[in-house]
Amino acid sequence: MFLHTENVLKFAFSNETNDPYETSESLKFGILGVPFDGTTSYLPGARFGPRTVREASYNFEAYNFQLKKTVPTGVLDLGDIEVVHGNFKKTCSKLKSTIDDVLSQNIIPISIGGDHSISFCIINAITQALGENKLTVIHFDAHMDLRDEYGGEKYSHATVMRRILDLNPLQLIQIGVRSAAEEEATLSDERLTSFSSHQVCEDIENIINCLKNISGPIYISFDIDVLDPAYAPSTGTPSPCGLDPMQIEKLILNLESKELVGMDLVEVASTEIGDSTAMNAAKIIFDFLCLH
Ligand SMILES: [Mn+2]
């Protein structure tokens, strides 16, 4: 071991080891890359998300200035799933069984996509572990992702939240929406609450109150396109009139001390070092790590 070297393929401030038995920390997080973008419909490149978000993580301090906390020491970078490009079913099966293992070792999964289709596989594993009707999913996204099918496909980044509703969560709270098909915008489901990006701008306190009232386990699915393309241009389906990083920070930091059982951060299609999209994504993961 050389003193002044670091492995830049691992998330910053993660442990030297990725073996949970080699760390004595009681609170463990597992960073997992899922470089699958087989259901992307517009701009490709989300397969580069794990690599560019990890690279961007080296730009940050371990100390969280707003929360006055340091990144916990039990962060393991578990590496990337061996995806099968072009085959969602096979990729999903590998991802779900990996998440099953991660959960069985009491590790909180933090997955970096990849396109949004992968969230289904992760939430499927979490729902099986918790039981139906328990999990609150907070979904940050420009899009509702509630179509029943897209291009004839049931499993897609455009249908992922509809499939997650099929898993019977306690509730699904969407934040930042500004784009939907009529089928999605008019979908009536008592478990579903959708806040538009305009509602975030006009009355963010109302949404913060909604988040504060959540009890029980929470999973956060974060599509980077919830940010305005000014802040996150390198993404599969950018959509104008989005949120800014201050609004995102404010919403996320209000989840401090909640029962957060996992998160994913998807649709980062950066290909360059220093890209603002990957930078904003890494910041959200750091904030999540300090919420506990
Ligand atoms: Mn989206």
Image: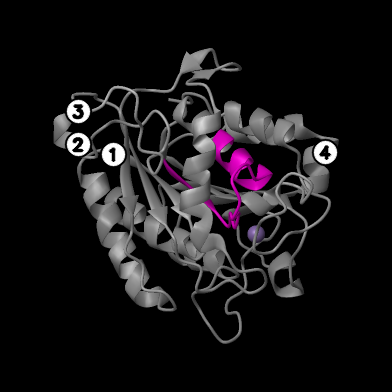
Q: Residues within 10 Å of mark 4 (few under 14, many from 20)?
A: some
Q: State the separation of the CA atoms marked 3 and 1.
A: 12 Å
The answer to whether the residue labelled 2 contacts the one labelled 3, judged by CB atoms less than 8 Å apart, is: yes
As drawn, 130 above or below 254: below
Kindly identify which residue carries mark 3. Answer: 23
Kindly identify which residue carries mark 2. Answer: 20
Under 8 Å from ligand 1: the CB of mark 2? Answer: no
- Secondary structure of residue under mark 1: strand
Q: Residue at x 49, y 62 (%)?
A: 47
Kindly identify which residue carries mark 4. Answer: 201
Q: State the separation of the CA atoms marked 3 and 4.
A: 43 Å
Q: Residue at x 56, y 55 (%)?
A: 191
The percent coordinates of residue 80 (x first, y second) are 35, 54
The answer to whether the residue labelled 1 contacts the one labelled 2, judged by CB atoms less than 8 Å apart, is: yes
Under 8 Å from ligand 1: the CB of mark 3? Answer: no
Q: What residue range appears in magenta?
A: 262-283
Task: In this rendered view, identify the residue nearer to me: 274 or 43.
Answer: 274
Question: Amino acid type of disc 2?
Answer: Pro
The N terminus is located in which quarter?
top left
Q: State the separation of the CA atoms marked 2 and 3.
A: 6 Å
Q: State the separation of the CA atoms marked 1 and 4.
A: 35 Å
The percent coordinates of residue 32 (x first, y second) are 37, 49
Which numbered disc flags the more N-terminal residue, 3 or 4?
A: 3
Question: Amino acid type of disc 4?
Answer: Cys
- Secondary structure of residue under mark 3: loop
Q: Of circles 3 and 4, which is in front?
A: 3
The percent coordinates of residue 62 (x first, y second) are 47, 21
Question: Amino acid type of disc 3?
Answer: Thr
Kindly identify which residue carries mark 1. Answer: 107
Q: Residue at x 71, y 35 (%)?
A: 245
Q: Residues within 10 Å of mark 3 (few under 14, many from 20)?
A: some
Q: Residue at x 28, y 39 (%)?
A: 107
